[in-house]
Amino acid sequence: MKGGFFLVLRSRKNRSTEDGGQKPRNARWKRFVSYHLSIILISLVAISGLITLRILDPFVVREARQTAFDLLQRAEPRTYIDAPIKIVDIDEPSLEKLGQWPWPRDQLAELVDRLHAAGAAVVAFDFLFVEPDRMTSSGLRPEVPGPVLRSSEGGNVTISELSNDEIFADALRRGNVVLGFGSSPQVTGAPPVKAGFAFTGDDPAPYITKLPGGARLLPVLAEAAAGVGSVNLRADNSAQAVRVVQLLWSDGEDLYPSLITESLRIAQGAQTYVVHADEGAGRVQSLRIGAFDVPTGPRGEVILYYTKYRPDRYVSAADIFDNERLTALVPDLSGKIVLIGTSATGLFDLHRTALGQTVPGVEMHAQAMEQIIQQQFLVRKDWTRTAELLAMLIACLAVSLATIFGTAQTALLVGAAISAVISFGIWYAFRDLGVLVDFSFPLGSGLAVWFIVTVFRYIVTDREKRGIRTAFSRYVHPEVLKDIERNYSQVQLGGENCELTVMFTDVRNFTPLSERLAPEEVVSFLNRLLSRLGAEIAEEAGVIDKFIGDAVMAFWNAPLRQPDHCRRACAAALKMRSAVQGMNADQSFGLPEHVARDGPIEIGVGINTGPACVGNVGSAERFNYSAIGDAVNVAARVESACKEVGYDLVVCRSTAEQVPDFAFLEAGGVALKGKTDRVSLMVLVGDETVSASADFAELREKHARLIEALGRNDPPSIERALEDCRPLARRFGPKLVEFINKMPTRMEDFAAPEAVELELVPAG
């Protein structure tokens, strides 16, 4: 004990003399700085990694961004406004009525003629006519007389003498028809271009999306068509939702229009496209199609802004071949661009939209035309990427700072608030400005940084908390342990001087009791008793220093400060006495009958308040969190004095003065072993309820007279005072009667100079 005490004092002395007491403060500051710098560093590393990830833009990031844009559209799709666009659908009823696909091209010629007769401004086929029609009129259809036409070789021929392709080509020449071309890596060559291209800035051909392989179209039909455009939607839309359509294509040298642009150009009678490109930037800004300016992406694409599926966009192809139905459809077809496509399942032209719906590919062309005509676009501006990175930085930094200086829950709340602000800004840009700003990366990055920093704190920096939990889990109540964890930066485990309230408790007559019990019975008895006493200490947020055989040492006001530490210690003592009385009444100690009938189990409790050094004491390999100092020694001696005083709960005046509303009675100045001067002691009778009672007020008054008589050594006055005190003391238990009766045998304790009456004013 002395060696350990000497080492602690020497350590404290060195701290105070060698560095002016600054070492503990500097150590705490270093830990604080190291702790926060480590989290800041890991946050910066995480943010740098996320910025690099965004610059590299891998598939996962791109897909997350596209999914985010899909969610914006699903939240508020484009409002449908009737536009001069109609789709003639080769649907299942059409195939059932008119025969399986492909239809003979003379039948398609009739379809074109009927549409022109109904007033269609432009007819566009979302099909590829790559090979000659092998189903001739003479082979598959009955020969019918028809008008005489002039063949390409000269001379007059009848319709029956022409091939289906020639019949179809003649129908194409009689109106405005746009055919589609496709592409194949196995075929070389280029489709014909029916329009001219002008451009401002750089020549855009080198950086507009390349045709995937050569393109092809049956020459006789290509020559007869008013326009030729690509039916490819986009090179990278093959296995996912169609989110963009290509308005322009390139082979690296020449430009080619899409079916969308050609249909709009023919409908307006325009001859030339005007491509606006950034000088030296290697990107397209916009495309002018007749009277329409279309803001495009850098490669000549346009983002599809979908409406929900609308059946009124469609007319069944079977209705076009029904004269009565066709007559009724004239108002719907007149002056319109009519797109011919298919929704039949077996023809494999169904695609998924950003709204999650599956529609025919021809509808993508129709919706793109509607956007252009109505000038409703979704665009990505030059500043959107910068805005996304800035939003990501704000989210990550806010979450990082909240995590560094707060809890994980605080960081989540801050992150949620930042996310709400970012989401509102992105929603405003989408709904009111038609600008797509990615919210997935900023919000995902903030969540990623929160997760990384939280995990880092748990794995690395929260080792201190886990060490504290390990160190204190056996000594304190779980609620106290939670408080320590919340305020762990205030905990000093190396040793510190502070005011403590220290308690010692001991079992009365334990030695003769243990002699009558078998060893295992002694262990069982102690486990039951000490478990109950320890629970009452923990309930009042005390720290159990150690169990010493049948004794318990505990203290308050460390490792965290407790302004009411004296009150807590006194309350714990009262609860411990009540607990032992209850266990006696319930025979909860499990003692053999021949031992239990000897009398109830009793304890003595001594409490003192004073300065002490508290911290980890022991060797580097094995230590204990303990308190050392004169205040601890005095508390141990006070517990021993319980027998001399004749009461079970004895406290020093230094403790009682800080709990003036509890019920205390003066016990005199007692000479304690190892102390030169006498120590003024009090007995703890009860809590504030007892102190406020009329019985205790009367007892306190009679007890004061008894002390006065003892101080004068006046036997008659002493006897009268004893007679007055005994019946009142009996109301508070036999132990208090024992204390009163023993006072005359301790005349020297009350004659000492320290034995001055303590005037305690009860609460209220």
Image (cartoon, grey):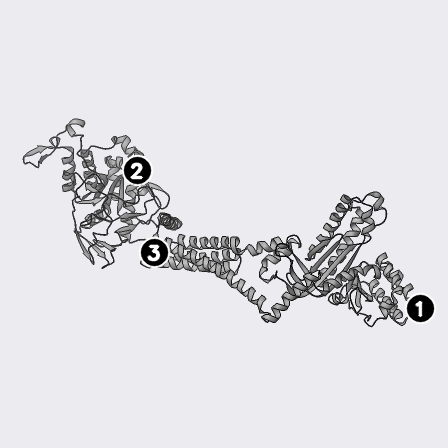
Residue in the foreground of this view, choosing between 495 and 505: 495
Q: Secondary structure at mark 3?
A: loop
Contact between labelled residues 3 and 2, with CB atoms less than 8 Å apart: no
1 vs 2, front mark = 1
Amino acid found under the numbered disc labelled 1: Pro
Question: Which residue is the site of mark 3?
Answer: 435
Q: Secondary structure at mark 1?
A: helix
Residue in the foreground of this view, choosing between 563 and 343: 563
Q: Position of residue 193 (x, y in %)?
A: 16, 46
The structure residue drawn at horizontal position 64% and vertical position 68%, both measured from the top left corner, is 13
Residues at marks 3 and 1, CA–CA distance in whole angstroms: 102 Å
Say above or below: 749 vs 190: below
Question: Which residue is the site of mark 1?
Answer: 715
Q: Position of residue 201 (x, y in %)?
A: 20, 59
Question: Which residue is the site of mark 2?
Answer: 343
2 vs 3, front mark = 3
Residue in the foreground of this view, choosing between 366 and 395: 395
Q: Position of residue 308 (x, y in %)?
A: 35, 45
